[in-house]
């Protein structure tokens, strides 16, 4: 095993390059050299690959790590992803290459819940539309529908969904949820949230907020048929993954009056093309995949990712709940 003073850690996310914080102190205290490439927030493949071959650990963000990119990271002994989503990492390929992949559970669910609520209020109170009109010289008062005594439907009752429940109730909203995972039953009982089928939730809720992971089974979970179940006066919030929603079907629903509006922190293609049809719609509020990132959650995510890196490089157990592929630990590179 290399001495700690020989070990190099790639800091891939632009928001962390040059940022002070506990994560940096943890890594530098071990004597690691931090490699911080120039470039934008999310390094494209061509800018990421040249740095991978000379580092022992990767502190990763939203960059794509398919197998052909991981092939360049033969020296790396861990890929520590900030956040809990990992659809940008080919975990099976990493396992085959004996590369452990970790995430940072429990670090950003409060931030996502706050952002979902912000999108909900921006949509229902017409905040963005009215701001735009005022800047165009139109001083026209809008009469909006209040959210109090409406029903919020949570598709997913994990950490984020659970964090959203008290926030919604603070606005006097009713809350229902759909989640097929048996482990959420106790949380639903504790929070007094009725669990219903997805179709019932879509037909009942005034606002539907998506908090599900992206899997082969959940791609286009919200498709044309399911959008047709929703009330014409209802709103869709997505702070999870863009591919949960069939955007072509959503566009049709938004432009035909079948849906009142959508608040989207995520899209099927990120960043979107300059001529994306959502840009022309007043009933869509967009943010650039920032729901899980505020100054506190960013520091918490980065610190836990750094702890995973230190644990791996010092031969200690990786923090509980972080390791995605335990089979990768059975390697021959230590």
Image (tube, helix red, strand yellow):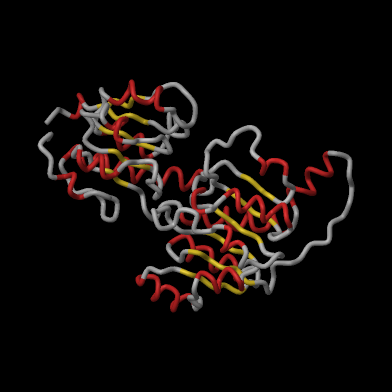
Q: Choose between 201 and 5: the one closer to the eye.
A: 201
| Residue 122 visible in rendering | no
Vertical order, 218 against 71 (above or below): below
From what the image shows, is residue 73 above or below residue 294? Answer: above
In what quadrant of the picture does the N terminus appear? top left
Q: Quadrant of residue 175?
A: bottom right
Give the left or right position of residue 249, taking residue 211 as reference. right
Q: Residue at x 24, y 49 (%)?
A: 325
Please identify the quarter of the rendering in which residue 185 is found: bottom left
Q: Residue at x 48, y 70 (%)?
A: 178
Where is residue 200 shown, x and y percent of the image? 55, 74
The residue sitting at 65% across, 60% down in the picture is 235
- In the picture, measured across the screen, residue 225 lies left or right of residue 308, that is right
Q: Position of residue 69 (x, y in %)?
A: 32, 30
Residue at x 45%, y 43% (from the top left corner) = 298
Q: Quadrant of the C terminus?
A: top left
Residue 269 percent across, percent down from the top left: 52, 39
| Residue 79 left/right relative to 111 | left
């Amino acid at each position: 095993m290399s001495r700690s003073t020989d070990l190099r850690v790639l800091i891939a996310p632009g928001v962390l390059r040059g940022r002070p914080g506990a994560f940096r102190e943890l890594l530098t205290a071990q004597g690691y050299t931090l490699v911080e490439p120039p470039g934008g927030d999310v390094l494209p493949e061509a800018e990421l690959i040249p740095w991978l071959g000379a580092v022992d650990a990767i502190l990763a963000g939203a960059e794509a790590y398919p197998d052909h990119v991981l092939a360049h990271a033969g020296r790396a002994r861990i890929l520590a992803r900030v956040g809990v989503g990992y659809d940008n990492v080919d975990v099976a390929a990493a396992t085959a290459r004996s590369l452990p992949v970790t995430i940072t559970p429990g670090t950003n669910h409060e931030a996502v819940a706050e952002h979902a609520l912000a999108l909900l209020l921006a949509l229902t109170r017409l905040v963005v539309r009215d701001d735009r009109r005022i800047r165009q010289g139109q001083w026209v008062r809008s009469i909006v529908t209040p959210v109090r005594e409406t029903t919020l439907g949570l598709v997913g009752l994990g950490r984020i969904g659970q964090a959203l429940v008290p926030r919604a109730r603070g606005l006097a909203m009713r809350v229902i949820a759909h989640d097929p995972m048996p482990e959420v039953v106790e949380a639903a009982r504790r929070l007094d949230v009725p669990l219903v089928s997805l179709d019932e939730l879509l037909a009942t809720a005034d606002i539907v907020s998506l908090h599900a992971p992206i899997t082969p089974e959940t791609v286009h979970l919200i498709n044309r048929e399911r959008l047709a179940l929703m009330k014409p006066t209802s709103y869709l919030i997505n702070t999870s993954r863009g591919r949960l929603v069939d955007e072509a079907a959503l566009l049709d629903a938004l432009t035909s009056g079948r849906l009142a509006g959508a608040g989207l922190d995520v899209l099927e293609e990120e960043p979107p093309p300059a001529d994306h049809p959502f840009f022309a719609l007043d009933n869509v509020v967009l943010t650039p995949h920032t729901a899980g990132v505020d100054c506190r959650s960013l520091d918490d995510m980065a610190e836990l990712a750094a702890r995973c890196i230190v644990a791996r490089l010092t031969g200690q157990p990786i923090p509980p709940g972080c390791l995605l592929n335990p089979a990768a630990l059975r390697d021959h590179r230590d």
